[in-house]
């Protein structure tokens, strides 16, 4: 994308616009900080590595998950906390990730999920409607399901 606009590609005499989004992930660092500070979010590319020692394999899938945040540094993250960037920005300019909790202008709260069936990011209670840039001016990221799951609880 140059100047914020999709770049046209001519293929077989048809003009096709390619919309490209940044592919990146986030995850909560695994383990505890030595100084007792809270875990931090790590942003970058997702990698996973097969566990070498099968005694480590428990209820998970047998892989260790890492976010590579520089060319040479990566941090192990909690598998359950990994979420992909949707390519969308909320009304305040904050990036929206899978697992975020957003609040609509009508004060309803929704979780952002990926729908395998519809192959799109959507609201958990409306998986048949994909998210788009125009809708995001009505939403604000208020937290995520890993740090504040109680925000989605019905009172």
Image (cartoon, rainbow, N blue to C red):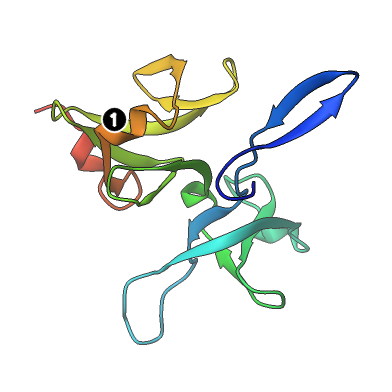
Seen at 64% across and 58% down, the residue is: 45
Up/down of 77 relative to 23, above or below: below
Residue lying furthest left in this view? 155
Up/down of 142 relative to 124, above or below: below
| Frontmost residue, 104 versus 33 | 104
Seen at 25% across and 48% down, the residue is: 148
Residue lying furthest right in this view? 12
Question: Taking 63 as reference, is 95 left or right?
Answer: left
Image coordinates of residue 81 in percent, x first then y, are: 47, 50
Mark 1 residue element: strand
Question: Taking 16 as reference, is 30 left or right?
Answer: left
Image coordinates of residue 57 in percent, x first then y, are: 66, 53
| Frontmost residue, 55 versus 38 | 38
Which image quadrant for residue 133?
top left
Crowd around label 1: few <14 · some 14–19 · many ≥20 (10 Å): many
Which image quadrant for residue 72?
bottom right
> Which residue is disc 1 drawn over?
110
Image coordinates of residue 18 in percent, x first then y, are: 70, 33
Image coordinates of residue 136 in percent, x first then y, are: 34, 34
Question: Taking 154 as reference, is 124 left or right?
Answer: right
Seen at 38% across and 28% down, the residue is: 134
Question: Which quarter shows the C terminus?
Answer: top left
């Amino acid at each position: 994308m140059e100047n914020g606009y999709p770049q046209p590609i001519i293929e077989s005499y048809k003009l096709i616009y390619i919309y490209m989004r940044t592919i990146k992930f986030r995850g909560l660092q695994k383990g505890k900080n030595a100084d007792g500070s809270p875990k931090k979010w790590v942003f970058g590319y997702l990698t996973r590595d097969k566990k070498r020692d099968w005694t480590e394999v428990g209820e998970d899938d047998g892989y260790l998950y890492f976010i590579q945040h520089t060319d040479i540094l990566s941090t192990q993250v909690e598998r359950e906390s990994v979420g992909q960037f949707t390519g969308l920005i909320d009304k305040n300019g904050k990036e929206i990730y899978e697992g975020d909790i957003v609040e609509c202008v009508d004060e309803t709260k929704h979780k952002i999920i990926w729908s395998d069936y519809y192959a799109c990011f959507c609201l958990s209670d409306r998986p048949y409607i994909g998210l788009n840039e125009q809708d995001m001016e009505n939403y604000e990221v208020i937290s995520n399901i890993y740090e504040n799951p109680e925000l989605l609880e019905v009172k």
